[in-house]
Amino acid sequence: MLYEELNRELKSLRDHNLLRSRHDIEHVKKQKISIKGKWYINFSSNDYLGLSQDASVKKTMVEGIKSFGCGAGASHLISGHIKKQTELEKKIARLIGMDQGLLFSSGYMANLAFFTTMIAKSDAVFIDKLNHASLNQGVLASGARFYRYAHLDMKSLEAQLEKSNAKKKWIVTDGVFSMDGDVADIPGLLRLCKKYDAYLYIDDAHGYGILGKNGQGILSHFNGIEKKDFDRIIYLLTFGKSIGLSGSVLCSKKIIGDYMMQKAKPYIYTTAQNPSISLAALTSLEIIKNKQILRTHLNKLIKIFREQIDKKELLGNSITPIQPIILKDEKKVLAISKKLMHMGFYVSSIRPPTVEKNTSRLRISLSALHSLKDVLGLTQAINSLINSHAI
C-alpha cells in the first residue's frame, strides 16, 4: 500500500512536469561546473560574490582543518565551540549593529530554533506570502497562530495586525525574496511594528553581501532605521550565499541570544559547525566589507542582463543578482532550461511548489565570477529560445 501510494504520487508529479531531479556535479572551476564530462557556465548558484572560489577563503579553510580537524566532534555546549566562533558571532553582530550573534550550522536550523523556542502558541505571527520555506516551516513548528499577508502589501498586513488581540505579535519576512529577487520594505514593516507593538524577524540570506553600505545587508540598504529600532529586530545572516560557505548567525538583543543558548533544542542537541568554516567566514566578511569592486562588477552585470532581455515583461522586479524570467508554463520552462544546457548554460527551472502555481520560471543567478561575455551569451540564448517558443 505504501509503495503504491508513493508511485502514484511520483507519477502524478512526472505527468504534470513537476518531478525534480539532481545533476551530479563532478568539478567546479570558478563560474563553471562539470557534469558527465561536459562544462557549463553556472547561472544557478547563490555564490553571488564568488567567494566560495576565492583563494584566500580557501586558504583559511585549509588552515582551519589543519588546526582543528575536519569536524567539531561535539555540540557547542559540550566541547565543540572554538574561540574563533565566538569572535565570528561578535564580529557579525557588530557589523549589523546588533548586541549578540549565535552561530548555527544552517539558516534553516536557525529559523527552526528561533520559532520553536521564542514563539508561544498564544502569539500571532504575520508572514509574507512569498517567504522562504524554512521560515514557514519554523512558524508551523511553533504551533502559533499565523497569518499570511499579500506579498509586500503593507495594507494587507496592517489590516491583519489591527484585528489581532494577541499579546505578542511577530512579523516575519525575507530581506530579499529568493525566487523573485525583490526587496522587503523594512522601514514600512518597522513602522507597523511600532504602531502595533510587534517584533520583526528578518532572514537576510540573499541581501547580505549585496545590499547596503559595504555590502552589510538589508538594514544598511535603507536610510532612517534608528538604533532604537534594533530593539524590535531579530536578524539572520546566512553563509550559503554571498559569504560562499554554509552556516548562519542569528543576531538579536543579548537576552534573546542568552535564552536561545539555554533553550533552543536545534542549537543544543547537534554537533557544532565545522571550525574551518567559521575561520573561512571571518575571511569572507573582510572581503565583503573591503572589496567593493566585486559588487560594482556584479551590479554592472545585473544592469546589462536586464537591458539585453528582449521581453522585459517576463522579468521580475529585481535589483539583485536573482533575475527570474517568469514563463508560467512548466513544460516551457523545462524545455528552455534543457535547451540552454545543450548550449552550455546551466539555468534552473523553478516550478511549484517552490513557487506558486502559474509562476514557473527560469531563475537566473548572476555572480561576480561571471564575465560580460558570459552574460551576453546567456541573454542571446534566452532571447532566441523564448522567441522561437512564441511566448
Image (cartoon, helix red, strand yellow):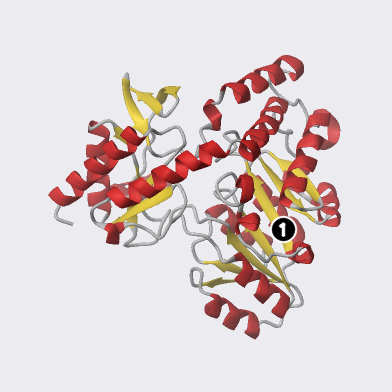
Q: Quadrant of residue 290?
A: top right
User: Crowding at label 1, few (<14), some or many (≥20) Cα neighbours within 10 Å?
Assistant: some
Farthest top residue in view: 66
Quarter that holds the C terminus: bottom left
In the rendered image, is residue 119 in sight? Answer: no
Q: Give x and y (percent) for residue 218.
A: 61, 55
Residue at mark 1: 234
Q: Image point 38% across, 55% down: which residue? A: 352
Going by the numbered disc 1, the residue's amino acid type is Ile
Q: Give x and y (percent) for residue 49.
A: 52, 37
In this picture, is 185 found above or below 354? below
Kind of element beneath mark 1: strand
Q: Image point 55% across, 31% down: which residue? A: 51
Q: Image point 84% across, 37% down: which residue? A: 77
In this picture, is 168 found above or below 265? below
Farthest bottom residue in view: 163
On the rendered structure, is 7 left or right of 99? left
Q: Give x and y (percent) for residue 12.
A: 30, 52
In the rendered image, is residue 127 in sight? Answer: yes
In this picture, is 299 found above or below 164? above
Which of these two is toward me, 261 or 6? 261
Which of these two is toward me, 71 or 144? 71
Q: Give x and y (percent) for residue 265.
A: 76, 47
Which of these two is toward me, 43 or 116? 43
